[in-house]
Each structure stands twice: as structure tokens, then as C-alpha cells.
């Protein structure tokens, strides 16, 4: 029962991280499309067929690249957090099982052992 609660809580945490990762990935893909469009526009400007002038494009590309790098770094950060959460889930489950086994051992110990009143050796 307790392990079920722990598992549910960890699943919720992983689910929230996974959702954040998916949103960050979608944002990255959007920025990547924007970057590709800017690069195409830069090629068109060399041929004289661009909607934007070369100066504007040369300002926008570094800004877009910086946003793309930031989005990529955020995705990597979320991926690490997700891996850590999954790893800690396993550790927490092991710790819970150990605690439950101690509680079970205590429940089955006789009354004297529970109170710490084991047979004392005379001096």
C-alpha cells in the first residue's frame, strides 16, 4: 500500500517532467524552423529575392541561434532531472521496503525485545 503511494507520487513527478520536456522540445522545433527560414531568407537575399534585407537577417540569425541553444540546454536539463527522478524512485522504493521489513520484524519480536529488556548477563 505504501509503495503504491510512493509509486503514484513518483509517476506524477515523472509525468510532469515529461510534459515539460515535450513542451521544451516543441519550442526547440519551432525555433529550429524559424532558424531554417532565416537561413533560406539569407540565401534569397544574396540573389536579391528576399523579403528582408541582409542587415536585418544578420541581426536575427544570432538571436535565433541563441534562443535555440537556450532551448536545447533547457531540454538537456529536463532530461537529466527526469533521469534523476527515475533513479531516485528506485532508491526510494528500496528504502521503503527496508523500513517496512524493519517494522515487520519489530511487530513479530516478542515483548521483551521490543522494550529492550533482553536477558542481562550478571557481572
Image (tube, rainbow, N blue to C red):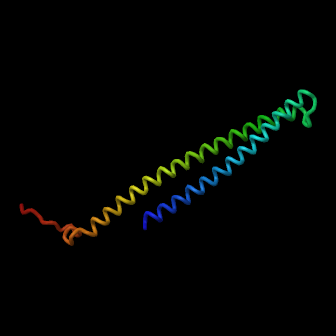
> Would you identify the image quadrant in which residue 94 lies?
bottom left
State the residue at coordinates (53%, 47%).
83
Residue farthest to the top?
A: 46
State the residue at coordinates (39%, 60%).
96
State the residue at coordinates (55%, 50%).
82
Residue 97's spot in the image, x, y percent? 37, 59
**Viewed as shown, does residue 27 lie left or right of 76?**
right
- In this view, the residue in front, 86 or 112, is 86
**Viewed as shown, does residue 93 lie left or right of 45?**
left
**Viewed as shown, does residue 109 lie left or right of 54?**
left
- In this view, the residue in front, 114 or 121, is 114
**In the image, residue 76 above or below residue 92:** above
Q: How many discs appear?
A: 0
**In the image, residue 15 above or below residue 69:** below
**In the image, residue 73 above or below residue 101:** above
**Viewed as shown, does residue 15 lie left or right of 57?**
left
Q: Work out which quarter of the rendered image holds the N terminus and state it.
A: bottom left
Residue farthest to the right?
A: 48
**In the image, residue 34 above or below residue 88:** above
- In this view, the residue in front, 101 or 112, is 101
> Would you identify the image quadrant in which residue 108 lies?
bottom left
Residue farthest to the bottom?
A: 111
Residue 67's spot in the image, x, y percent? 73, 41
Q: Work out which quarter of the rendered image holds the C terminus and state it.
A: bottom left
Residue 87's spot in the image, x, y percent? 47, 50
State the residue at coordinates (35%, 58%).
98
Amino acid at each position: 500500500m505504501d509503495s503504491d503511494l510512493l509509486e503514484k507520487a513518483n509517476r506524477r513527478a515523472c509525468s510532469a517532467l515529461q510534459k515539460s520536456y515535450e513542451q521544451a522540445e516543441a519550442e526547440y522545433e519551432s525555433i529550429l524552423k524559424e532558424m531554417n527560414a532565416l537561413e533560406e531568407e539569407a540565401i534569397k537575399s544574396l540573389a536579391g529575392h528576399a523579403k528582408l534585407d541582409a542587415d536585418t537577417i544578420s541581426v536575427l540569425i544570432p538571436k535565433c541561434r541563441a534562443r535555440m541553444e537556450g532551448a536545447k540546454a533547457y531540454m538537456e536539463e529536463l532530461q537529466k532531472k527526469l533521469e534523476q527522478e527515475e533513479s531516485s524512485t528506485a532508491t526510494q522504493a528500496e528504502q521503503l521496503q527496508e523500513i517496512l521489513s524493519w517494522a515487520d520484524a519489530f511487530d513479530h519480536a516478542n515483548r521483551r525485545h521490543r522494550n529492550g529488556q533482553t536477558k542481562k548477563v550478571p557481572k
